[in-house]
Image (cartoon, rainbow, N blue to C red):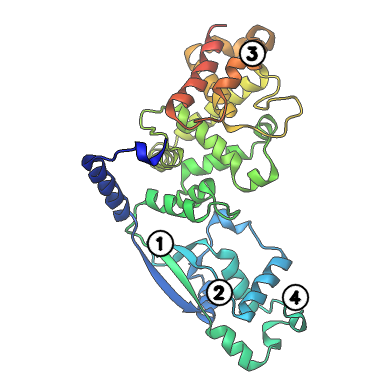
Amino acid sequence: MSSEAIMITPDERDAAEKQIADQTKRIDFYITEYSVEILANKMQSGEYVVPDYQREFTWEHERKSKFLESLIMGLPIPFIFFWEMEDGKLEIVDGSQRLRTVADFLLNGYRLGELDQLSNVSYFAFEDLPESRQRKIRNRSIRGIVLNEHADEAARLDMFERINTGSKNANTAEIRRGALGGPFMRLVIELAKDERFAKLAPISVKSKNERGNEELVTRFFAYGDGLEKYRDRPADFIFEYVKRKNVVFGERPTLLEEYRRRFQETMDFVERAFPYGFRKTPTGKATPRARFEAIAIGSYLALQEKPQLHGMSRDQLNVMSWLQGGDFLAVTGSDGANARARLEGRVNFVRERLVRQ
């Protein structure tokens, strides 16, 4: 549609301004600027906290050296992003590798590798540099943005999801994992490591490193429990769901086993009924998210509606009669995949066909 064909009414303009103002109020942040020396000391003393979802990501030696070469040369260093914790410490959301590398270099004797631009500095430790250069490096400043404790959690997730678009260090599932630690989140992490689940729903190494398996498990529970509050934004919906479930699981510990059993019984059924698990082909090495949602949640709902399915064999269930058909491929396509109607459509497609057996 061309811009000439769109007419914005005064009411639409007012509604747009109100929405912008409302969203702006959710973001509450301040800017910091510290010397490299102070940042290294704060990192070493534990004032800056590396969340669980970032601890296993470690730069390789070559990348550390390249970053430190940039620091020594005086090139601009990107902002560090933090969340302000209740105890006043700052949790690092983007920049933990930079801060860890700085602390290692200034305080822990880290030795550079082979450098491109500063070849004469290759293999130096910090203390090998002239004292004047050490002072200049210590006095360099790096800016930080701190989203403080008054910003609501959904705003934090949304802000840092946008900051980290394209980054391997913190995607939605990783940030959720760090921001919403609790009994339900621990169950998700446990189930995501299940060996059988890994075979039924294979994902790439990259996706696994980005918590793709945890995302699938979380969606299984969140969508399986109902979509009444779903508004076509999975990140917000799942964030609020996990937050609520952590509270509920804390109050009712017996739910832990109930949800674990729900997951395992569904995986039992999928293993028995679906020859390829959640894969498209026998040798497939990826699990399309829409396909997983359709099969996993559709199967769970069908088992709730018709418990007799638990005792039926693969031949009796005969899922291959529709699994590779055009109708199923259409409902699990990617177009508009997160729209509620599409999500309910693919889940109910599987549920209905299983219940008919």
Specify the quadrant that holds the N terminus: top left
Q: Nearer the viewer, residue 265 or 354?
A: 354
Q: Do the residues bearing badges 4 and 1 touch, measured as CB atoms within 8 Å?
A: no
In the image, residue 167 lies at what x, y percent?
58, 54
Q: Nearer the viewer, residue 188 or 337?
A: 337
Dot 2 falls on a residue whose secondary structure is loop
Cα gap from disc 1 to disc 3, whole angstroms: 49 Å
Q: Which mark is residue 319?
A: 3
In the image, residue 351 lies at what x, y percent?
52, 16
Cα gap from disc 3 to disc 2, whole angstroms: 57 Å
19 to 130, vertically: above or below: above
Three-letter amino acid code at disc 4? Leu
Q: Do the residues bearing badges 1 and 3 touch, measured as CB atoms within 8 Å?
A: no
Q: Do the residues bearing badges 2 and 1 touch, measured as CB atoms within 8 Å?
A: no
Three-letter amino acid code at disc 3? Val
At a point 25% along the width and 47% down the height, the residue shown is 18
Residue that numbered label 2 is attached to? 76
* Mark in front: 1 vs 3: 3
Specify the quadrant that holds the C terminus: top right
Residue that numbered label 4 is attached to? 115
At a point 47% along the width and 13% down the height, the residue shown is 305
Residue 257 appears anywhere in the view: no
Q: Which mark is residue 165?
A: none
274 to 199, vertically: above or below: above
Instruction: Return the disc, 4 or 1, that comes first in the chain's sequence.
Output: 1
In the image, residue 235 lies at what x, y percent?
45, 41
Cα gap from disc 4 to disc 2, whole angstroms: 18 Å
